[in-house]
Amino acid sequence: MPSPAPRTPAPNLLLAGFMGTGKSALGRQLAKRWRRPFIDTDEVVERLAGMTIPEIFEKQGEGRFRELEREVVSAHLPEAGAVIACGGGLVIPEGMAELVRSKGVVICLFASVETILRRTAGNSRRPLLKAEDLETRVRQLMRDREQAYLRAGVAVYTDGRSLQQLCDIVGRVYDREARSFSRRKLEG
């Protein structure tokens, strides 16, 4: 009797999207539910740099931060089996969406400006949100990034949905996309 084909590990799930859309909360919940490791790319960047993200922006600039993000995706993510929350701007620089898609199934979370403002209120760890008119700043950043997010992965809107509902929705999208991703990997 032939032995069964080796089971390939499940592709990574990478959650991308603007800050405050729920990537970390949803990612942690899905990782717990699926019994997979959870990785937050911002936390890995901070460990590599030995400083917080606001410190990186202040001392080394956004360009260095983006270099560190690229290094994290290129060299510090597992090949499969993890749930990964990507930093809000990670898929924006040239070539990053393609690099992220090579690491697993990418789902981009979206939320309204009002929801993002509510979720990020008082968070001093977001250097790109240091502005006098925060709403205008968020609207501009979202406008600038929207097309890149839509190209990076499947869009899921988080407004008005509970964490449980989002887990179910993202789980269904992931199952569908994981089959496609695995086929593409096998075809080389």
Image (cartoon, rainbow, N blue to C red):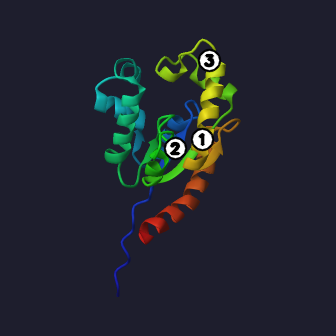
Assign a secondary structure to mark 2.
strand
The residue that label 1 is drawn on is 109
Q: Crowding at label 2, few (<14), some or many (≥20) Cα neighbours within 10 Å?
A: many
Counting residues from the start of the chain, the first of labels 2 and 3 encountered is: 2
- Residue 68, compared with residue 168, is above or below; it is above
Q: Taking the image as drawn, is residue 26 in sight?
A: no
Quarter of the image holding residue 187? bottom left
> Quick one: which residue is furthest to the top in this view?
132
Q: Nearer the viewer, mark 3 or mark 1?
A: 3
Tell whether label 2 touches label 1 (CB within 8 Å).
yes
Quadrant location of the C terminus?
Answer: bottom left
Which residue is depicted at the point 65% across and 35% down? 111
> Quick one: which residue is furthest to the front in this view?
94
State the CA–CA distance, disc 2 to disc 3: 24 Å
> Quick one: which residue is furthest to the bottom in this view?
1
The residue that label 2 is drawn on is 15
The residue that label 3 is drawn on is 134
Where does residue 177 sit, x and y in percent of width and height? 55, 59
Quarter of the image holding residue 53? top left
